[in-house]
Amino acid sequence: MINMKTRYTTYTFPALLLLVGILFSACKKEYEIAPTPYAEITSFKIPYNAGKDTIVAIVNGENIYVSWPGSTEWPIPETISPVINISNNASISPASGTAIALNDGAQYQVKAQDGTTKVYTIKLSNGAVLPSFVDEETVLPLAVGGTYSIPFRNLATDGSDSLFLVNDQNKLFKLIAASQNQLSSFQFIADQYDGTGIPTGDYYVQVNNKYRVPVRSSKKIVNITSGTAYPYPYFNHTKTWEVKRGDIISIPVRHLSKQLLFSSVSFNFINESGYPDAFPLEFLAISEDLKSIRVKIPNDAPTNVSTPFSGGILLSLSGDWSTFLASPYYQYPIKIVE
């Protein structure tokens, strides 16, 4: 009878670790992470209004659709600095936050990690409403110092638009605003803010919004006529000017001459019922330096009334009943106190 013995192999601990390592190595596979092929713009945002508002563009295919808001307050600027999100591991040129010229057809290139590139094109629609001319055929004759108006569409409601005359040499002459609340027409005095006048001749008209976006007439629609400039009050006081009944005051007036005679000088105000009202001031004399006129506040003038911010003092020339010369818009009123 043959005696069979079972044989067991005993491994020491170091030998066991070696065996496990050999087995694990035999099963291990090598993995390599391939570069990502993604070159997508996932969001495209444009801050505006000093960062208080944001335009979110629509990215569809390889186009970036930017619709600028339809408001006279926010015309399209020359440059924007978009905040752009893209695929992981990709890069974009120009980079997010870089200022670019905003125009239809501007492009961005996104490069994926594997080198794949994709070009995106901005498709711009202008919803911004800029001022436009009602009439570009009729030529308006202006005399320096006179008060006039030109009708427009889409003037800013806050009175922030500025009006210019432009000559053939592209020189701009900024006109004096006669009213802050320009709605359907721009009211102005035909003079520059420093009172130096405007040369005779024919001019284009240009209106600029507060972002200096210009809109110019296609033709010369203003003619500055020759002749003596009309006088008009131009205030420079820096706070409410308080006067009393019987006071004699000096009102600054431009373009005065010794030959001028005034048929009336009126103090305009808003009465208790909320309607425009006026009373005459007593004209006394033109100053020797031709820079002001002296007038007297009547002893029976109403009290606690103030001139409005535009047209507060109205001059009428003797013998010229068709011309009324109003003070332009100014920040501080004249008030009659007790």
Image (cartoon, rainbow, N blue to C red):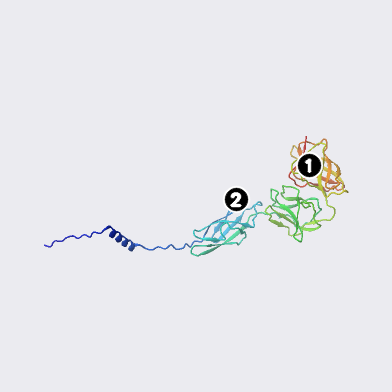
Return the x and y of residue 97 as percentages of the image width and height: 57, 56
Q: Amino acid at mark 2?
A: Asp
Q: What amino acid is found at the position of numbered circle 1 in the picture?
A: Asn
Q: In the image, is residue 31 above or below residue 72?
A: below
Q: Earlier in the sequence, mark 2 or mark 1?
A: 2
How many numbered markers are drawn?
2
Please name the residue that numbered disc 2 is placed on.
Answer: 53
Location of residue 24 (image quadrant): bottom left
In the shown orientation, is residue 259 left or right of residue 11?
A: right
Q: Please report the residue visible at 59 percent of the width from the left and 52 percent of the height from the top.
A: 54
Q: Could you tell me if residue 270 is visible in this image?
A: no
Residue 49 drawn at (x, y percent) = 62, 51
Q: Which residue, as the protein is rendered here, is positioned at the far right?
A: 259
Quadrant location of the N terminus in the rendered image? bottom left
Cα distance between the residues tagged 2 and 1: 42 Å
Q: Position of residue 303 (x, y in %)?
A: 78, 36
Residue 12, by quadrant, is bottom left
Label 1: which residue?
268
Q: From the viewer's perspective, tell me whether residue 95 is left or right of residue 337.
A: left
